[in-house]
Amino acid sequence: MSKSDPDSAIFMEDSAEDVKRKIKKAYCPPQVVEKNPIIDYANHIVLGFFGKFSVKTETVSSLSTLVRGFVMV
């Protein structure tokens, strides 16, 4: 992440539209968990705040459930 590139990180002052756009273009290779920014974001931000979320028809309430579902895709 570089401060010179405002699209390389999500900032507290970003609008909802900016966050959505940045997440949609994030590098997220299929079945790769290590150093995957989407897995990290889901674990620390989404699960940290909401405690769970749903992916398709499965409710995710832990990192292990998220990783298991992600790798199975």
Image: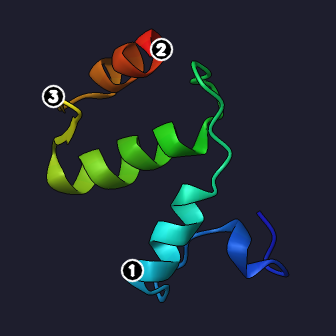
Q: Which mark is residue 16?
A: 1
- Kindly indicate whether the residue at mark 3 contacts the one at mark 1 (C-beta within 8 angstroms): no
Residue position for label 3: 57
Is 30 placed left or right of 68 in the picture?
Answer: right
Marks 1 and 3, how far apart in space?
25 Å
Q: In x, y percent, where is residue 26?
A: 63, 53
Question: Considering the image in quadrants, where does the C terminus appear?
Answer: top left
Q: For the residue carrying disc 1, how many other residues have a C-alpha within 10 Å: few (<14), some (14-19), or many (20+)?
A: few
* Amino acid of disc 2: Val
Marks 3 and 2, how far apart in space?
16 Å
Q: Which mark is residue 2?
A: none
Tag 3, which secondary structure?
Answer: loop
Is 43 placed left or right of 23 in the picture?
Answer: left
Q: Earlier in the sequence, mark 3 or mark 2?
A: 3
Q: Earlier in the sequence, mark 1 or mark 2?
A: 1
Residue position for label 2: 71
Is 19 placed left or right of 34 in the picture?
Answer: left
Q: For the residue carrying disc 2, how many other residues have a C-alpha within 10 Å: few (<14), some (14-19), or many (20+)?
A: few
Q: Quadrant of residue 58?
A: top left
Q: Residue at x 52, y 79 (%)?
A: 18
* Amino acid of disc 1: Ala
Question: Considering the image in quadrants, where does the N terminus appear?
Answer: bottom right
Marks 1 and 2, how far apart in space?
28 Å
The correct choice, above or below, for 37 with respect to 65 in the image is below
Viewer-nearest of discs 1 and 3: 3
Q: Quadrant of residue 31?
A: top right
Viewer-nearest of discs 3 and 2: 3
Tag 1, which secondary structure?
Answer: helix
Q: Earlier in the sequence, mark 1 or mark 3?
A: 1
Q: Residue at x 46, y 68 (%)?
A: 20
Q: In x, y percent, where is residue 57?
A: 15, 28
